Image: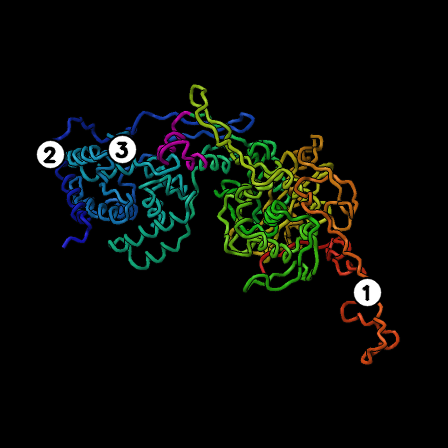
Amino acid sequence: MDTTGGRWPLRQVATLLALALLAAACGPVVSLELAPIDPDAPVREPPTPSTVLDADGNELATLGTEFREPITLDEVPDHVIAAVLTAEDRRFHEHRGVDARGVVRAALTNLATGEVGQGGSTITQQLVKLRYLPDAPRTMETKLAEARLARELEQRASKAEILEGYLDTIYLGSGAYGLGAAAWTYFRKDVTELSVAEAAMIAAIIPAPEAFSPTREPDLVRHRRDRVLRAMHEQGHLDADELAAAVTVPLRVEGRPPADETTEGHWVDLVVRTLLDAASFGGSIEERADRLYGGGLTIHTSLDPDIQSAARDTLTEYLPADDDPEAAVAVVEPQTGHVLAAVGNRAHAQLQFNLATQARRQPGSTFKAFVLAAAIEDGWHPDDLLDGTEGEIAPGWEVRNYDRRSIPRVTLAGATRTSVNTAFARLGLEVGLDRVAAMARASGVTSDLPRDDPQLTIGGGRTEVSALDLAAGFATLANLGVHAPTTVITAIEDAQGQTVWLPPSSTSAPITPAGAYVTLQVLQDAVERGTGLNARIDGWEVAGKTGTTSDHADAWFAGATVPLAAAVWIGHLEGRVPLENVRGVPRVTGGTLPAMIFSDVIGQVLAERPPIPFTLPSEHWRTVDIDPRSGLLAADHCPGERRQLPVILVPDEECPPPPPPRPAPEPPADDEDDADTVEPPDGEDAGDDAGDDDGEDPDDDAPESPDDDTGEDPDADEDDPEQ
């Protein structure tokens, strides 16, 4: 009975494919002369290296593909060979160039999953493609040619020669060709020194070394490495103890510095990652790598050497010791989206991980800036009152304030100034988690945000961002709500000086100019009078927000001036280690070292520039009459004061009319014939049950002016988002 819905069974299709390749391998030899195996022969014409420049035109690095360390098979340890054969060609010593079993197995897997996950090519076939058909299209004709040539190669060369040629030729990522180059690139070792775990990692990335980059995709590569190790155990190359020991080894790779002398290894790595991830730079990741490493390109980047130096020097000044916490600074130009600096306090030789762009941690209360922006844009006023009492905000989620005080009434501006968690938790839930997340994403936050976690409202729970994310978000506010996509590359030229690639330039506007301006004013108040006092810069208006996680493991400051936005992070990469007793600071919060570093870095850069205030263009202001009592538009019955307001703060309602005067009580009827009439006692009024007039103002029960009872604590230190 046919249960395939009219399709051939998978095994039948796979078997036919295997038979076709075998038939091709056994058929007439193609008319292509095979050269002798030469381990030192290049795969193709030597490519032209590309050059990376900073914004001033200084050369940062040369990206070249010809990184080779020739080896002989005698140098390669048995466990390294076993790892490669286990991952790529388990029956290498049994087949004659084409492995029918391998083809069937790969075809079955690919057809079952609907993806091309396994190639089925033998090591001999891969060597043929590398040496003789490097630029051939991926077609059935090419596969048939590979099969025929592999069959002939097996007749002309020994297995040892084929394996040696393969191991010395294969591309293994980061510009490394051959096993010897990969050993040095990833582990700074000679191939003879590779451990079992290191050998398995190299074997795991062979199918797609750029897509499976251990520096870009460490979790994926570790999973693939462990799968190779388990297969080695199944094949008898490792015993149980050796397997158990190998899978516990952390995945630690170096990643070859793009240039031996560069001091900007992290930046150049960022440029490389950006282009390898950019679909507009090339069709596949392999094609993009070929173009990047061998296209003879000149890559102009946005790195400002003066700002980068100021950030690096400031971090070194504040955190000079090896046992100090990690820290990072990211600086973005609001009007262009250019990333001007992205630096951590660890040198590239110490840590091949970009703390400013790759370290994603809980942002704490810095994330409240996006809640604030969404609320202002949705019609909230800075003087609107919020509930800041402690307690259960959402089912199972109790929120506490930093100083453990409940604040029954606090204005939105006051809650921002002193970072009242409970008020923002309620506000964020009322605005909506989807709305808050959308505001953050549209403003420049690239991290995935948990739209189902109420702790998003105060930057806790599963909320994680990078320093560059926050700098980009605050840059959007500083640019009056216009988001210019962040970029580290400004242009790429070919060898003839023609521009061949530009970054995306389309802008978006997640916030209206008036909404962004009002948000900036509230955040500026948080710096001038609130938790961000240490971020002030003489003469300049600074809008910013502090952030500290509940366990004091991460401390942040994110802020903006008109020309520059920046974010500073301090924390530990491994473990939730409290930031205590750091450089004389008993407990680090966002308002301490991070705010001070922000002020020092941005203050140095702006020292020679005339201050520029945040300004809202005149078309976004309205002159209206406002009733001072209600805060609504004035009317004939409630004359008001002339005020100029950002359009987003102009009320859309008039002040309510006064209540109508209460009619005077009617005198009792004088009906002497009514014997049942009872006169009230002296001093009583028969109208009391209907409603009295005791002289109280009907507005006495209205809330007091926000300035009369805000519940704010101007000395409050910081926030505590994870409760």
Which amino acid is tagged 3?
A: Leu
* Magenta span of residues: 274-296
Q: Which residue is mark 3?
A: 130
Q: Which residue is mark 1?
A: 693
Residue 27 tag number: 2
Q: CA distance from mark 3 to mark 1?
A: 98 Å
Which amino acid is tagged 1?
A: Asp
The chief SS type of the magenta part is: helix
Q: Quick one: label 2 or label 1, which is nearer the N terminus?
A: 2
Q: Nearer the viewer, mark 2 or mark 1?
A: 1
Q: Give the mark count.
A: 3
Residue 653, can we see it? yes
Relative to 120, 380 lies left or right:
right
Front position in the image: 155 or 278: 278
Relative to 429, 100 lies left or right:
left
Which amino acid is tagged 2?
A: Gly
- Extreme bottom residue here? 675
Depicted 197 relative to depicted 697: above or below: above
